[in-house]
Image (cartoon, rainbow, N blue to C red):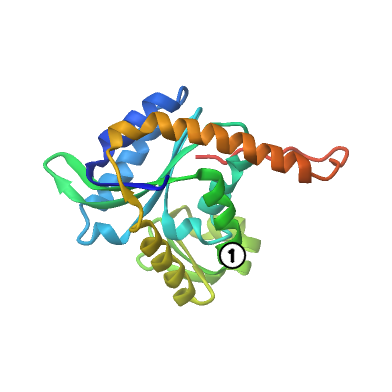
């Protein structure tokens, strides 16, 4: 069942998920909270939806727009765990602001593996990248293919990237995807957060079993000496 939880304490709710499902590297969550606080303190925090996941060894938090750009770290990370046996609890997060010390907002449940498949079908390739290098007064823009090919030499010349933003060839297409995602989740059924976690964990375990059975049935014979996929780095 697709549920939404409106006007909740985002940190408190997600921390309860993390403490229940994430057994190792729980300190990852503090980075997530810092990102959410910075967004909550902006003028229009609701314009920056996030994708958040809890897994057995850590958490991840990304901007929704980045997940839907195929060449981003966010895209590759959101794809990475779908063919593992990990229990992944994922939410879309809409932050509405601060209420005292609390980060307020809305949470929307995700079926992680179904969402990863949807993103794989829907995401747009990156066409350009804007980089704010450390110590530079103005950001620099590159075609993504050029930046990807010359990344090491560019960073050797200009230094560390403080900010990094990918864009597709037609930004309007990405805006359309994000608007469609927002409209879809706003039709979810209102729920009580404290009551849903057991059901979500059970549903996720069923999803893992179903996905792995399908993957095993459709998998080609593995090639010899194929390099194992490496986990994403935080």
Please identify the quarter of the rendering in which residue 146 is found: bottom right
Give the residue pinned by disc 1. 147
User: Is residue 228 positioned above or below 71 on the image?
Assistant: above
Query: Residue 117: image x %, image y %?
Result: 59, 53
Please rate how many residues cluster around mark 1, counting C-alpha atoms within 10 Å: few if below 14, some from 14 to 19, many from 20. some
Please identify the quarter of the rendering in which residue 232 is found: top right
Determine if residue 230 is in view.
no
Q: For mark 1, give the secondary structure.
A: helix
The residue at the point 77 percent across, 42 percent down is 217
Determine if residue 128 is in view.
yes
Number of labels in the image equals: 1
Q: Toward the viewer: 171 or 188?
A: 188
The residue at the point 36 percent across, 40 percent down is 32
Outermost residue to the left: 100
Q: Toward the viewer: 195 or 76?
A: 195
Query: Residue 200: image x %, image y %?
Result: 43, 35
The residue at the point 19 percent across, 61 percent down is 43
Query: Residue 150: image x %, image y %?
Result: 63, 62
Q: Toward the viewer: 148 or 120?
A: 120
The residue at the point 22 percent across, 57 percent down is 42
Instruction: Say which quadrant the N terminus sits in.
Output: top left
224 sits to left or right of 129: right
């Amino acid at each position: 069942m697709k549920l939404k939880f409106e006007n909740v304490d985002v940190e408190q709710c997600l921390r309860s998920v993390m403490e229940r499902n994430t057994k190792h590297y729980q300190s990852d969550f503090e980075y997530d909270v810092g990102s959410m606080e910075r967004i909550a303190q902006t003028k229009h925090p609701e314009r920056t939806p996030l994708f958040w996941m809890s897994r057995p060894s850590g958490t991840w938090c990304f901007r929704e727009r980045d997940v839907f750009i195929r060449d981003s770290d966010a895209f590759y990370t959101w794809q990475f765990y779908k063919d593992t046996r990990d229990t992944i609890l994922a939410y879309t997060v809409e932050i509405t602001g601060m209420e005292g010390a609390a980060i307020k907002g809305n949470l929307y449940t995700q079926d992680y593996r179904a969402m990863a498949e949807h993103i794989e079908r829907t995401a747009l390739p990156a066409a350009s990248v804007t980089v704010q290098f450390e110590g530079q007064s103005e950001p620099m823009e590159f075609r993504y293919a050029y930046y990807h090919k010359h990344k090491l030499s560019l960073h050797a010349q200009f230094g560390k990237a403080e900010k990094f933003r990918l864009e597709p060839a037609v930004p309007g297409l990405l805006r359309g995807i994000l608007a469609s995602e927002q409209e879809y989740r706003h039709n979810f059924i209102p729920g009580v957060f404290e009551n849903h976690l057991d059901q979500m964990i059970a549903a996720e375990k069923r999803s893992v079993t179903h996905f792995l059975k399908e993957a095993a049935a459709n998998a080609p014979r593995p090639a010899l000496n194929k390099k194992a996929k490496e986990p994403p780095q935080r």
